[in-house]
Image: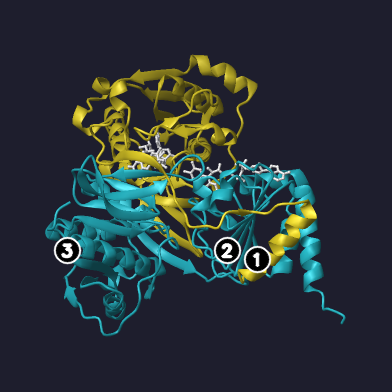
Chain colours: A yellow, B cyan
Amino acid sequence: MGLEILVCIKQVPHPDHFSEIRLDVGSGHIIREGVPAIINPLDRNALEEGLRVKERFSGKVTVISMGPPQAQKALEEALAMGADRGILLCDVAFAGADTLATANTLFYAVRKLGKFDLIYCGNETVDSGTAQVGPQLAELLDIPQVSGVQEVAFVDEKTLEVRRALEHGYMKVRLKLPALLCVTRGINRPRLPTVQSIMEVAQKEMIIWKAKDIGAPPESIGLKGSPTCAAGVYEHKVGRRREIMQGSTEEQVQRTVARLKELGAI
Amino acid sequence: MSNSGEIWVIGEQRRGRLEEVSLELLSKGTALSQRMGVTLSSVLLGDEVEEIARELVFHGAEKVYLLEDARLRYYQSEAYARLLSEVIKEHEPQIILIGATEIGMELAPKVAAKLRTGLTAHCIDLYVGEVDDTPHLIHVVPGWGGNLVMHIICPQRRPQVVTVKPGVLPKAVRDENKKGKIIRVKPDVRDEDFRWIETVEVVEEPPQGKSLESADVVVCGGWGMNALGDFSRVQELADILGGVVAGTRPAMDKGWVEEAWMIGQSGKTVSPGLFVSLGASGAMHYTTGFMGSKVVLAVDHNPQAPIFHVADVGIVGDLREVLPCLIAELKKDRMPRKF
Ligand SMILES: Cc1cc2nc3c(=O)[nH]c(=O)nc-3n(C[C@H](O)[C@H](O)[C@H](O)COP(=O)(O)OP(=O)(O)OC[C@H]3O[C@@H](n4cnc5c(N)ncnc54)[C@H](O)[C@@H]3O)c2cc1C
Ligand SMILES: Cc1cc2nc3c(=O)[nH]c(=O)nc-3n(C[C@H](O)[C@H](O)[C@H](O)COP(=O)(O)OP(=O)(O)OC[C@H]3O[C@@H](n4cnc5c(N)ncnc54)[C@H](O)[C@@H]3O)c2cc1C
């Protein structure tokens, strides 16, 4: 018995270094050389949720990530937080994926892994932040899903009542397992790895799969499986006055106040 | 681009009230439909919402496909996604516009995945343009770095689906003389749609006090406020100007503002009379959140900061000097003159 839990994690550039990141003008891909990488912050909340459910009902937590070889680091960190097994989906054939192709890749891996009772995702990533992968994956798996999850209560072992965020309030949704939940940052405080748990990482299972290992058809993954594509990066032109005030601080401030008055802003 | 296939705006209503973003999508939809010579339609799901369907017509929809059922009163994840994808399959629109609300952001990827088609998130603009000499619908999204946007296209699969953040586009003009057809579609709502997932309660209250979206002055602090240690000076400036305090993402991460007061792609979009940006570099993800402001004032000590490209008035200087001075000057200004 026990629950089979899957947590999807993405390795992302560290937000403190965002100013060093550029978009490749041709491909629209992120250039992040030399920028330290971390687990997408909300994916830690997702993992924490998974670990708590496991602690309550017993079970197994698998973490999965599609990404370059260095994404294994993110999975190892998740193992150090307490996950039982890591799966890295790593193949050049996965590269250039849009969200549908990303969801497809995860779908084929889940299909190969077998049944899960609960799948957790972050609501969105900090680097491209579409918030689309979770709902798309759920749809491909044909299981119920909720975005913006703030709170989860078990009505019984097979039924959840979830509170999800709305603009000025919330919505309560009841759903049956298996289900996929996309969590927000208020849901919990992710734990830190302990010395003990870090030592255990080496004993844990880490699987690396390529496209053929999960039986993903080439036309449904990577660039080929992506209905959307980048068509360049451009400067955004806005019609602003761009007047930089001159003089000492006092003069700049006085001129600013005068100018704002002329413009009717104050 | 094809001249067959309608453009669809998904109307979003909550408990019988139309979300404003639907009207914003209709203004863009009208422009695109005229440019492409195709029909602009809207789809609306709900219970007893014909009046809202008429509003969609008054704002530019030439047709409204109306799906009414008592069980569609609230957004219902599976029922809404299934019914929507079925009307889409039947009528084959080529473009679908959805508001990037909390609900739209969940519904759009579900529908797009059911249709195995492309979905672009958080567009700030849409227009017909050429890529490699072929006309495409260009989806403009915020890119990395200051002032950079990325163009996304969906060359083959149809329909192409996009979400647009509320508050970014202007609203369509209401005209009660506009004529449009309301087409009733009998929704085939099934028990099964609610077996695995069901919305059981919706609680929404309009915010108390001054809301960010309706404020006439927004004073937004960025990471640069670290130099002053906290946000008290931001608050002071906002108080003098009769405005509200907001922050960038690093300011929120730091705990200076709550998530609901973050400006930008992942936060709120505002269009006040005056937007003041203090110690924020001007990343596109941030600046998209206040593009519609009437006047923008920026303060930053880096003259190269991209924020100055999107400002009307700029002060290059250290916030530790500029901010107290600006506050003092405004205080002086607000004092009643003696003679
Ligand atoms: C500037 C920019 C804009 C983009 N816009 C679009 C767009 O509009 N439409 C589009 O289809 N693609 C877009 N992409 C491509 C998109 O970034 C990739 O498909 C990416 O792999 C997943 O999207 P995300 O980071 O937005 O994930 P989100 O949907 O925000 O991720 C939500 C959750 O899904 C899980 N997850 C996401 N990625 C992975 C992964 N690789 N491995 C395991 N779990 C994962 C995590 O739990 C994560 O928290 C864009 C890329 C860039 C650089
Ligand atoms: C998908 C995605 C979505 C995002 N969504 C958002 C969003 O919704 N909102 C958001 O804000 N960000 C968002 N971001 C992050 C965004 O890209 C930037 O990283 C962020 O806006 C930077 O915030 P900042 O300008 O406060 O900090 P920084 O970029 O660090 O800028 C700080 C500025 O302060 C100046 N400064 C420092 N000290 C002083 C001083 N003493 N006096 C004067 N000036 C000083 C510096 O010169 C600098 O220009 C998003 C990113 C991604 C990838």
Left or right: B128 with respect to A261?
A: left
**Quadrant occupied by the C terminus of chain A:** bottom right
**CB under 8 Å between discs 2 and 1:** yes
Q: Is residue B101 above or below residue A86?
A: below
Q: Residues within 10 Å of mark 3 (few under 14, many from 20)?
A: some
Q: Which label's residue is closer to the chain start, 3 or 2?
A: 3
| Spot occupied by residue A128 in the image (x, y as percentages of width and height) | 43, 40
Q: Nearer the viewer, residue A182 or B339?
A: B339
Q: Is residue A167 above or below residue A105?
A: below
Q: Please report the residue visible at 26 percent of the width from the left and 37 percent of the height from the top.
A: A226
| Spot occupied by residue B52 in the image (x, y as percentages of width and height) | 31, 77
* Residue extending furthest toward the front: A247
Amino acid beneath label 2: Val
Left or right: A159 with respect to B306?
A: left
**Label annotation for residue B295:** 2
| Spot occupied by residue B152 in the image (x, y as percentages of width and height) | 32, 44
Left or right: A1 with respect to B223?
A: left
Amino acid beneath label 1: Leu
Tell me the distance, in whole angstroms, between the alpha carbons under discs 2 and 1. 8 Å
Amino acid beneath label 3: Val
| Spot occupied by residue B12 in the image (x, y as percentages of width and height) | 34, 66
- In what quadrant does ligand 1 lie? top left
Say if residue B131 shows up in the picture.
yes
* Chain designation of label 3: B
Q: Please report the residue visible at 35 percent of the width from the left and 22 percent of the height from the top.
A: A90
Element marked by disc 3: loop
Residue highlighted by disc 1: A260
**CB under 8 Å between discs 3 and 1:** no
Q: Is residue A109 above or below residue A187?
A: above
* Chain designation of label 1: A
Residue highlighted by disc 3: B38
